Amino acid sequence: KGQVSLYKKSFSICHFPMEVRREASPLLSLLAALSYGGASMAMVFINKAIIMQYSYSMTVLTVQQLATAVLIHMGRVVGLMKAKALNMDTARKLVWVSLFYNANVAFALASLKGVNIPMYIAIKRLTPLAVLVVGFFAGKKRPSRVVSISVILIAAGVIIAALGDFSFDVFGYSMALTSVFFQTMYLVLVEKSGAEDGLSSVEIMFYNSFLSLPFLLFLIIATREF
């Protein structure tokens, strides 16, 4: 949801109602930003370490999604998290959104087998460019020239870095670029459908995790990872 809000501000592509919240103090805002940055970086390094030792990425993703769903459910039950109970009508609306979300995560995990962490982070920075291009062809309002130039410069930097990557891996790069594609489609689908309107970020995470489990269980059995 944080990514969607970022693209909303930058590209005027998404129009989610902002959650009503009290104004946070500058110190609390700084701590939140540092915590988010630390968790984001740690997630990449930990997943890379796991995939290097345990190459069954679909099984890793399945366990992660199961743990997420269970933790959020338990947090709601004991009152640590504010989230509504499971609603099947809402779940049906989110099926396709969840599919694209989990495809993005699955291909991102698979790419870590062959792509080093700096290049993985760089390739994922291509998502704003993809959103920008899709928004242009979808007839959305054009972003400012400054935003367009910034996004293009980031993409150019990724290409230059890739050309100088001595550990270039075709499989890893293909998986990472496919992940960018699915992340872009996820953002566009969310904007088009409005499926996530009225849901908190915790509730969205719960539905994405819950809905992914049958599909992921089928995949780990079909691919013999099980």
Image (tube, rainbow, N blue to C red):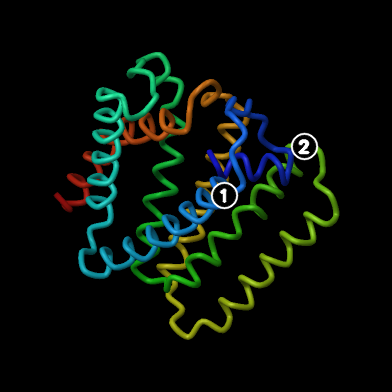
| Other residues around mark 2 within 10 Å, as few (<14) / some (14–19) / many (≥20) | some
Question: Which one is in front in this view, the residue at disc 2 or the one at disc 1?
Answer: 1
Amino acid type, mark 2? Lys
Residue 14 or residue 179, whichever sits in front: 14
Classify residue 146 by image quadrant. bottom right
Residue 224 or residue 183, whichever sits in front: 183
Give x and y (percent) for residue 226. 14, 49
| Other residues around mark 1 within 10 Å, as few (<14) / some (14–19) / many (≥20) | few
The residue tagged 2 is: 140
Q: Earlier in the sequence, mark 2 or mark 1?
A: 1
Residue at horizontal 36%, vertical 29%?
Answer: 81
Give x and y (percent) for residue 43. 38, 58
Give x and y (percent) for residue 41. 44, 62
In the picture, the disc for residue 126 is none
Residue at horizontal 33%, vertical 66%?
Answer: 48
Give x and y (percent) for residue 69. 28, 34
Classify residue 71 by image quadrant. top left
User: Mark 2 and mark 1: span between their CA atoms?
Assistant: 36 Å
Instruction: Using residue 168 as the reference point, say whether residue 152 is left or right of it.
Output: right
Residue at horizontal 51%, vertical 81%?
Answer: 165
Depicted 139 relative to depicted 124: above or below: above
Classify residue 142 by image quadrant. top right
**How many numbered marks have been drawn onto this rendered protein structure?**
2
Q: Residue furthest right?
A: 145
The residue tagged 1 is: 27
Amino acid type, mark 1? Leu
Residue 55 or residue 67, whichever sits in front: 67
Residue at horizontal 53%, vertical 38%?
Answer: 1
Instruction: Using residue 108 as the reference point, say whether residue 10 is left or right of it.
Output: right
Residue 189 or residue 170, whichever sits in front: 189
Depicted 35 relative to depicted 81: above or below: below
